[in-house]
Each structure stands twice: as C-alpha cells, then as structure tokens.
Image: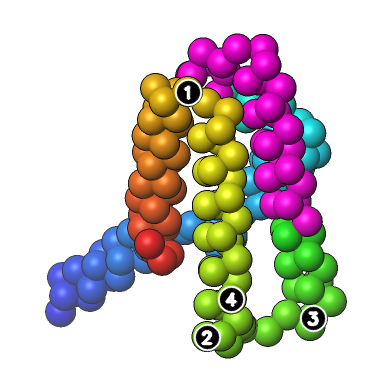
Amino acid sequence: MKRLAVVLVLLATIGVAAQKNEGPRMPKGPKMDMTAEEMATLQTKHMTLALDLTKAQQDKVMKLNLEEAQLRKEKWAEMKALKESGEWKKPTSEEKFERENARLDQQIAFQAKMKEVLNDEQYQSWKDMRKHKAMHGKKKMQERGRRG
C-alpha cells in the first residue's frame, strides 16, 4: 500500500513538473519599444547587407520601410488603447475579413513599390527572405500552441 502511494505521488509530481510555462500569451517584443524611424533604419540596413543595395535604393527602401513602420506602430497603439480602455471586444467574422483584406491590400502595394526599387535578382532574394521569415514565424506560433 505504501509503494502504491509513493508511485502515485511520484507520478503526480512528474506530471506537474512537465507542464509548460509559456509566460504571457502575447509578449510585446523588443521592437515595439523602438520608434518607427529606428525600426525602419534597422530594417533598411539589414536589407542593404542582404541585397547589396545602392545608396539610391537605400534611400527609397528607407522611405518605404518608414511608412510601413509608422503604420505598424499606429495599429499597435490603437489596439493597445482599445484593450487598456476595456472597449476591445472580439471582432466579428466581417471585421476579421475587412481587417485581413486591408492588410493584404497593403502588403500587395508594398510589394509593388519594392519591385520598382529593386532589380530582378534583388527582388527575388527579398521575396525569398520574406517567405523564410513568414515560415519561421508560423513555426514559432505553432510551437507556442497558437494559430498557424
């Protein structure tokens, strides 16, 4: 009887210790502490190293990255304000569709602008980089047990 009790306690202890502790659901991340200009500068420098951009291309890409970063910061601040005020509610399917449609339209426009700035080889490398980054993000979300 004592052995059975010891085995049960041991199994319960192992079961509790094996639980994942993932911390908060949506960590803010270090990039949201930066300004839009800082994010755009870092992104542009990363792209310059990866794609071997000329000075003229760097200036154009910096402008595009700055627009993207400002838009991201605005959306993030808007959602944060809604959540802090308590007015945030789960979006309906129509709102989700509209938000996703607007996001995709914005990505298509950004991609078209990048195609104008980059040559064919750079553009293909840029698309491959984005694809790799998207797949890596999807993998991370699956590891955390979120969507993806």
Q: Nearer the viewer, mark 1 or mark 2?
A: 1
Label 1 and label 3: CA atoms lie apart by: 47 Å
Q: Nearer the viewer, mark 2 or mark 4?
A: 4
Q: Which circle's residue, 2 or 3, is located before the other in the chain?
A: 3
Q: Is residue 60 magenta?
A: yes
Regarding mark 3 in the picture, which secondary structure is present there?
loop
Using a 10 Å C-alpha cutoff, classify the residue at mark 3 as few (fewer than 14 neighbours), some (14 to 19) or many (20 or more). few
Task: Tell me which residue sits at (71%, 22%) in the image.
Answer: 59
Task: Tell me which residue sits at (41%, 25%) in the image.
Answer: 120
Regarding mark 4 in the picture, which secondary structure is present there?
helix
Residue 99 place in picture, x, y as percent: 60, 71
Residue 89 place in picture, x, y as percent: 68, 84
Q: Nearer the viewer, mark 1 or mark 3?
A: 1
Q: Amino acid at mark 3?
A: Gly
Label 1 and label 4: CA atoms lie apart by: 33 Å
* Residue 74 location, quadrant: bottom right
* Residue 78 location, quadrant: bottom right
Residue range in magenta is 47-74
Establish if 64 lies above or below 82. Answer: above
Q: Which residue is mark 1?
A: 119
Q: Is residue 58 left or right of residue 107?
A: right
Q: Which residue is mark 2?
A: 93
Q: Which circle's residue, 4 or 3, is located before the other in the chain?
A: 3
Regarding mark 2 in the picture, which secondary structure is present there?
helix
Q: Which mark is residue 98?
A: 4
Q: Which residue is mark 3?
A: 86
Establish if 56 lies above or below 73. Answer: above
Q: Which circle's residue, 2 or 4, is located before the other in the chain?
A: 2
Residue 143 place in picture, x, y as percent: 36, 54
Q: Which mark is residue 54?
A: none
